[in-house]
Image (spheres, rainbow, N blue to C red):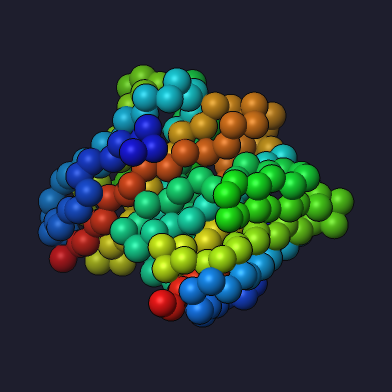
């Protein structure tokens, strides 16, 4: 099956710093999403980005599907950005519904 | 709220109990999923329902029994669980593979004692 590797596994930032999270995947995918899991377990969909670049406020993401990687950029980090960031990819399954394969996540801690 | 609601938020149950987790989505999606998140493990897909029919069961033990009575509701029935089944159980929904992505609920934190 598809392998999803995220780096770094842990990241500590000072408030206001910028960071880049990386997601490598081992095969072609139909879908790639970035999620933020807050300390209460809620998974928030940040980007649906199978290819190209998108921006939402201080966050942006780029996926280079031909090279099988995606990057999540966080600028001017805030303490509320703390949590675990997951990359997830979707594979076709029998031509019907796919399903998401998750990486192990990057745990981000932003210090005041 | 994401549009996917899970109840209860927390559940403590004994190994001989029977309980059910509930998930409801108001997004008009046609597929629903159960995921399990254990400590220090990636999220694991348990069940997929598309148009109310189960399309994938990732070799989940029979002590977990899903039910999808309609496209808006999904249940996970639990019986004779083991302590290692303690985890965060997350429900998600999606609108096929049309490119709208997946939306997750807040999860049920399950502890088996």
Q: Nearer the viewer, residue A50 or B72?
A: A50
Q: Quadrant of residue A48?
A: top right
Which image quarter is the N terminus of chain A in? Answer: bottom right
Which image quarter is the C terminus of chain A in? Answer: bottom left
| Position of residue B14 in the picture relative to residue A55 (left or right) | left
Q: Position of residue B101 (x, y in %)?
A: 57, 37
Residue A61 can be seen, yes or no: yes
Q: Residue visible at 61% across and 37% down?
A: A98
| Position of residue B81 in the picture relative to residue B94 (left or right) | left
Q: Position of residue A94 (x, y in %)?
A: 67, 33
Image label count: 0
Q: Position of residue A59 (x, y in %)?
A: 60, 54
In the rendered view, tell whether residue B94 sits above or below residue B40.
Answer: above
Q: Residue visible at 63% across and 70% down?
A: A19
Residue A104 can be seen, yes or no: no
Q: Residue visible at 85% across and 57% down?
A: A67
In the rendered view, tell whether residue B13 sits above or below residue A107.
Answer: above
Q: Nearer the viewer, residue A20 or B94?
A: A20
Q: Position of residue B9 (x, y in %)?
A: 22, 49
Q: Quadrant of residue A41?
A: bottom left
Q: Residue visible at 38% across and 48% down?
A: B90
């Amino acid at each position: 099956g598809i392998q999803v590797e995220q780096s770094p596994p842990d990241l500590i930032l000072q408030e206001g710093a910028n960071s880049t999270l990386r997601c490598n995947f081992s095969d072609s995918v139909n879908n790639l999403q970035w999620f933020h899991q807050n300390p209460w377990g809620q998974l928030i969909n940040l980007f649906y980005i199978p290819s190209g670049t998108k921006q939402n406020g201080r966050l942006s993401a780029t996926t280079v599907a031909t090279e099988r990687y995606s990057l999540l950029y966080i600028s001017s980090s805030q303490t509320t950005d703390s949590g675990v960031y997951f990359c997830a990819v979707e594979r076709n399954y029998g031509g019907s519904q796919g399903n998401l394969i998750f990486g192990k996540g990057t745990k981000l801690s932003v210090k005041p | 709220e994401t549009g996917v609601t899970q109840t209860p938020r927390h559940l403590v149950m004994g190994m001989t109990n029977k309980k059910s987790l509930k998930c409801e989505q108001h997004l008009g999606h046609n597929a629903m999923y159960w995921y399990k998140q254990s400590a220090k493990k990636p999220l694991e897909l348990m069940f997929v329902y598309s148009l109310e029919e189960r399309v994938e069961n990732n070799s989940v033990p029979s002590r977990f029994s899903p039910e999808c009575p309609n496209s808006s509701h999904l249940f996970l029935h639990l019986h004779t669980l083991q302590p290692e089944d303690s985890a965060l159980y997350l429900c998600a929904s999606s609108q096929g593979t049309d490119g709208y992505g997946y939306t997750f609920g807040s999860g049920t934190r399950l502890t088996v004692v």
